[in-house]
Image: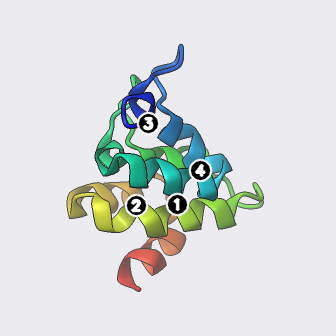
Amino acid sequence: MPSAAWVQDNDGLLPIHWAVERDGGKLEVLLAADPATATAVSRAGRTPLQEAWHSYHPGYGQVSTQLAATRLLIPLVPAAEALATIAYNPDTQPLVADVIIA
């Protein structure tokens, strides 16, 4: 399974990049198979944590999945990445900051 965790789609996204926004259960399986994917960078230059919040807009409806992904990923990523994720989208700042501080 670890090699399958690194297979990119046509947009350069790994399975973990998709799982952060759509399926927390699969995210847990992918991280267990290969924790190094937590810091994998897509062709767009985003890690899974950054991908989780990239397209966030208030009222979007997937906040619980994104928060769950953030809780799983925060211990696995460098602090600078976590802070950069907060700074990326002002709408996410309070949400992500609460998870990082907790």
Amino acid bearing label 4: Lys
Report helix, strand or loop for mark 1: helix
Residue that label 1 marks = 69
Q: How is the image coloured?
A: rainbow
Residue that label 4 marks = 26
Which residue is depicted at the point 28% across and 58% down?
Answer: 77
Which residue is depicted at the point 47% across and 31% down?
Answer: 14
Question: Going from the N terminus, do you reach mark 1 or mark 4 first?
Answer: 4
Mark 2 Cα within 10 Å, few/some/many (few <14, many 20+)? many
Q: Marks 1/4: CA distance?
A: 10 Å
Amino acid bearing label 3: Met
Label ID, residue 1? 3
Report helix, strand or loop for mark 4: helix
Report helix, strand or loop for mark 2: helix
From what the image shows, is residue 12 above or below residue 50? Answer: above
Residue that label 2 marks = 73
Pinpoint residue 50: horizontal percent, then vertical percent.
Answer: 43, 48
Pinpoint residue 26: horizontal percent, then vertical percent.
Answer: 59, 50
Pinpoint residue 41: horizontal percent, then vertical percent.
Answer: 34, 34
Mark 4 or mark 2: which is in front?
4
Q: Quadrant of the C terminus?
A: bottom left
Report helix, strand or loop for mark 3: loop
Q: Marks 4/2: CA distance?
A: 13 Å
From what the image shows, is residue 42 above or below residue 48? Answer: above
Amino acid bearing label 1: Ala
Q: Quadrant of the N terminus?
A: top left
Q: Is residue 53 visible?
A: no
